Amino acid sequence: MKENKHLLLFSSLGVLLLLLGAAFEEMVLKDWRRIQGRARSDEGAVTVQLRQIVNASLGVSDRCVSCHVSMGPGEQGVRGDKILVAHKPVVHDPAEYGCTVCHGGQGQATDKEDAHGKVHFWPSPMLGRETSYAGCGRCHATLRVPEQEQMRNAELAFERLDCLTCHRVEGRGGTIRPGGGGMEGPELSRAGLKGYDGAWYGKHEKKSAEAAAGPWKGAFSRVPADDQGLLKIYLDTRVAASRLVTAKSVFFSYGCLGCHKVSGVGGDDGPDLSRAGEKDPGQVSFKYVPGEATMENWMAAHFRSPVSVVAGSQMPPENISTQQLNQLTLFTLSLRRDELRDQYLPKDRARAVKFGEREFATDGATLFGAFCAGCHGQDGQGRRLPGLMSFPSITNADFLALAPDEFLARTVREGRPGRKMPGWLKEGGLRQEEIQAVVAHVRTLGGPAEASTKPARWVSGDAAQGRRIFESACSGCHGKQAKGGEGPALNNKVLLESATDSYLVETVSRGRRGTAMASFLEPSPVRGALSRAEIEAVVAYLRSLQGGKS
Amino acid sequence: MTLQSKAPRSRLDPEPMARRDWLGLSSLWTMGAALMFGVVGMLRLPKAAVLASPSKKFKVALPETLPAGEAFVPPGRAVAVYRDAEGIFAVSTICTHLGCVVKANAEGFECPCHGSRFHADGTVSRGPAPRALPWLKVQVSGGVVMVDEGTTVPSGTKVA
Amino acid sequence: MNPASTQNNALREFVDNLKSAPRRMYETAFRGGAPTTDRSRSTFVFGNVFLHLHAVRTHRWSLKWTTTVGLGIMSLSAFLITLVTGVLLMFYYKPSPEAAYASIKDIHFVVPTGRLIRNLHRWAANLMVVAVILHMARAFYTGAYRPPREYNWLIGIGLLVTTLGLSFTGYLLPWDQLAYWAITIGANIAQSPREVTDALGITEYFDPGGLQRLLLLGSDTVGAEALIRFYLLHVMILPLALAALMGVHFWRIRKDGGMVRPADADERLSKMKQGETYPVFTEAPNKTYQLAAVVRGKTAVVGRGPENTVPSMPHLFYAELGVMMLTLLACVALSMVSDAPLKELANPSVPENPAKAPWYFLGLQEMVSFSAFMGGIGIPAIVLAGLALIPYLDREKEGTGEWFGGPGGWRLVKLSMLIGFGAPLAIESFAIRFGWLREWFPKIPQLIVTAINPATILTAVYALYSIWCIRRYGSARSGALGLFTCFLCGFLLLTIIGTYFRGPNWVFYWSPSEWPKH
């Protein structure tokens, strides 16, 4: 019985000690207790307690303010620890919106590691300092962002035209008055959100003309029409998050949407990126990612060399600067979505979702950059990517000279079945006028079409003869029955339907410079020349194929 | 409890206990202490450290044109906010009797539950309510109006 | 009498009563007074509702720690801890898919003592499963299922099943990935009789699998309905069932004469060192304690008291309280070292990979990876039926109360352990290395795979081995010993394989560090 008494004594003693330890840990050792214990407000010490921001509409109960006390509602004056700085003034008051809505992390947690989400099993860790603007993407959709060159030009134009003399944008400029701090014109950081007077230029000119001296005379000068266009781009994209907008413009310059969908627009070859920013770091491999296991590093490593991070990826590595790499990372991380109650649905998202406004600018250059540049190259000269069939040049002057606009537009609309090119109208989600804009842009890159008076179909050759000629002269590259080989497949329904006879005949006759397609009117060392009649026979044969049904 | 006994004992004899069973008693008391401490810990549990309700301090989007004497009730809050020539003030609309939400009318407030009536300044005019409706702390900084439901101020405190 | 004085007397009496009320209250609560004599100790035990399940005197054999290893009390203590902590958790837990996960996070982060209480609940639940299984093994190896204890053995099996059920239903409640996918798998195991009915083509008319799944989930997917059902099972139905079964279990222990002990326990005790002896009774014709003996029709011992017994109060109670506090200590210590797991919020579109059940079901999951029906329902049913039949097949008396039934038993157990570990190791190695029927004959009918797979072969090997034991040693006890040991070893080995050697897509890996990332 003595043993049993000892057992009881020592077990009880153990339990008692452990419980005392647990109580000490909970009542004394918690970080937030220490921090609040040292904090002072104007009225003296603050009450040490768990603090939180609750917003049921946003699904937020953020205890971040248990440590970051001065970010809580009405606690701006609390000082003490280094982490007790008040939030810099922002439109979205953290006291109302909470913290995790923008920054990510685990709001319910009260330990640092857990709260910052740097723990296993928390899918959305806090965004880093460099990528903090990615949080905007949860609710906002920046609209009409152009590709990077226009964006850069617009930013340069704003600086070049000295607009910053009077206007403040995101903390810069507007310090015209002696002594600094003053601002003559309105702040433009959020012009794209709040809207601005479309007739501003006329009013500026008028004021400048009326003024006798001072900034209106000295700082304002005439703005050429081109620059006015750039300034419009600049103003439209001011949403108090210029880093994110610039990043977005980079995204729209490397043809990412050619293979990836974002919000229903884009190609099908790669994964849908609409929520790529919500990727759970617990679900991806960091084996080949240098540095800390964060999504930022993962994305950057992935953009640098996709296939070495994601096995089997067909995504080509782009030759871009580190800055652009980081911008792509920032933008990809911003691809998030929250179901929002109407009360919190921002105007830009509403315009995108309810009225179909585009997140990309709908000029030809931006559309080309966003959708075409990935496969056809920045200049449209085509690309050869390892492991994939080569992508044709679409800005070849010989090609464009023979291809009428309708042929180009139809090709973009309906794609090339069997090739990577999707039909951009239905599958890709582009609109008629956007496709027209792309075609117009391709023209600016490669030249106009020759005028032709011939009807679409005029060839009447002997298909049987054409077949013999094709098999001896063409199938070496274009494959048996024109199903494709080294050269593209001609036996393609959409190609045959949309290509005019003149296009086919002239392409064979003249060849296409810069490609393996030579002029068949001229003899070559390996074969004799073809006559026009023979070429027409070949075209007649192609017509008889009807796109794969032969 | 060791006992070497020479003669067989009757079952009716008491089993002699050691006079002071220190070991047994201390083990029992330690167990009692451990369990009591555990119980105290468990009793703390039902008292929540944070409440699921929204913060008591909140911003009020006061309309630019609010006629003096007319109450503005922020959606979802039991507070009436007023603005007159002397400034902004807020009156709780939770009846001091049993917590129903009172309704603003021409004379002041009336409670739908047990018939309490209040003047516009919150003082009781009739009915079972024991106290006047409290005035709540209002802060105005940079045009932003904040009301703190958790802090009462003397009636008549208006913030310009 | 003077009415005034009567009034005065009555009033005085009233005041006196009022004064003595506290003392009387104490006396009515503790009627026997301080338990210093044998008589008052007996009164204390049978006068107390919580203690009266104990006999007032306990045989010294029962108090040897090798008799029970305290496993029964340990199971009970673990249950009491889960009961108390579980009720406390119900203050904050919200059984709805939208709120469940967040409420667990709240319990973890902001509820005072919440983290410790949740950890305690989890560790006590795990400890309970371990203790119950070991308790069953103890009961088996000491022959405690033999007459008159056969029925209590059955109750014990019911308690085992209920314990596992309680543990498993608690698994869903946090509504994290772990929970969601474990329950999805569990529900589909419930549906797995379809494997047979489909093969026979009668699912349309007779679909017990579909019905089971529907009853469990209340819907065709794991959602709010399933959560409520599991919650109800976890906090109401199963605990009540467990409490009822426990009541019967304890009552039967008392009725069946306490702990099992060898026939010659008294002699052996007297040979052992005389540490704490207590004189044997000499005069006790009118015994009140061993009522069970009278009830069971044995000759009541007349003229002498039961030898080698000591008063339960305090001898037995010190032992019981000691084990209880030890269990509590273990739970608190584990709770402070390791937090109960909580993975990311349940996501019905991304299965957890690997989606692992609680550890005690990983042996089943290993078998399920060959055939859902056999692994999940067929073989567990066979095992349970086998366990239930043990007392009715082995009716020998020899060796009762001895570990492994005496000296020869331990050798047989060692041999059985060899078979018990060796057979599944061999079959698993073969299946992992060479695949199974489906890999060789892709078109093979499912019924054949259901009938012939590593799990069924393993069961058959065990069964054949135990028949060999019966023939070789000429006793049913040997067969039971062999079979039980085999099943215990098989359970252990498969659990280890399922826990440590199975990775994503249930592929074999030597260690979790080799798991591929997605």
Image: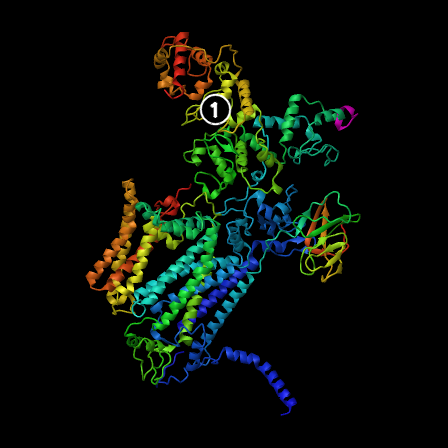
Residue A242 or A263: which is nearer the viewer? A263
Helix, strand or loop at label 1? It is helix
* In this view, C192 is above or below A413: below
Q: Residue C393 vs residue A423: left or right?
A: left
Q: Which residues are magenta?
A: A208-216
Percent across and percent down for residue A147 are: 56, 27
* In this view, C42 is above or below A513: below
Is residue C180 a member of the stretch shown in magenta?
no
* In this view, C17 is above or below A118: below
Task: Quarter of the image for the C terminus of chain A: give it.
Answer: top left
Q: Residue C420 vs residue A185: left or right?
A: left
Percent across and percent down for residue C58 are: 37, 75
Q: Residue B143 vs residue A272: left or right?
A: right
* x 49%, y 57%: residue: C118
Residue C98 or C279: which is nearer the viewer? C98
Instruction: State whether residue C368 appears in this view.
Output: no
How many tags in the picture?
Answer: 1
Residue C96 or C322: which is nearer the viewer? C96
* x 36%, y 9%: residue: A525
Task: Quarter of the image for the N terminus of chain A: give it.
Answer: bottom left
Residue type at mark 1 is: Glu
